[in-house]
């Protein structure tokens, strides 16, 4: 659903067109997903409310409800220059080290210390 149309082979393009014709709600969800990606990339806070409203009655309704439940955090992510991406990356790295220690037999995590 997120692959650019330009990179599809002819057979893939025909398949996508067939699916879109037969399952219009899926095509609608693809369009909403594309709008959401553009909104995130542009960091466009004003579009958030209208996107949530449009997505609420689509196949993305569960995702839209989640955004609505945490709307202040989503709005801050679109407007604030700060990011916790670096922190999350370090946490993921540490979890991987801990998991590898468990796999390699160091159940106490001594190698991670």
Image: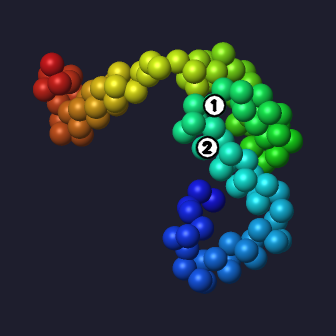
Residue 102, can we see it?
A: no
Q: Mark 2 points at which residue?
A: 38
Locate the C terminus and report the quarter of the image it occupies.
top left
Q: Do the residues labelled 2 and 1 touch (CB within 8 Å)?
A: yes
Q: In this view, does 58 lie above or below 28?
A: above
**Label 1: few (<14), some (14–19) or many (≥20) C-alpha neighbours in 10 Å:** some
Element marked by disc 1: loop
Q: Mark 1 points at which residue?
A: 44
Q: In this view, does 87 lie above or below 54?
A: above
Q: How many marks?
A: 2
The spot of residue 89 in percent (x, y) is: 34, 30
Q: Who comes first in sequence, dot 2 or dot 1? A: 2
Element marked by disc 2: helix
Horizontal placement of 34 versus 85: left or right? right
The spot of residue 30 in percent (x, y) is: 70, 55
Residue at the bottom extreme, as displayed: 11
Identify the residue shown where x is 17% and y is 24%. 112
Toward the viewer: 99 or 58?
58
Horizontal placement of 84 versus 37: left or right? left
Toward the viewer: 94 or 8?
8
The spot of residue 29 in percent (x, y) is: 75, 52
The spot of residue 14 in percent (x, y) is: 68, 80
Identify the residue shown where x is 76% and y is 36%. 51
Give the distance between the C-alpha atoms of the residues marked 2 and 1, in whole angstroms: 8 Å
């Amino acid at each position: 659903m997120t692959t650019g149309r330009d990179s599809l082979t002819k057979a893939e393009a025909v398949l996508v067109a067939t699916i879109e014709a037969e399952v219009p709600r899926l095509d609608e969800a693809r369009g909403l997903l594309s709008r959401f990606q553009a909104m995130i990339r542009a960091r466009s806070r004003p579009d958030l409310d209208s996107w949530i409203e449009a997505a609420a009655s689509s196949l993305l309704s569960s995702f839209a409800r989640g955004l609505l439940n945490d709307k202040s955090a989503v709005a801050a992510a679109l407007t604030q220059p700060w990011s916790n991406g670096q922190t999350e990356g370090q946490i993921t790295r540490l979890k991987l080290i801990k998991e590898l220690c468990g796999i390699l037999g160091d159940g106490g995590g001594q190698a991670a210390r």
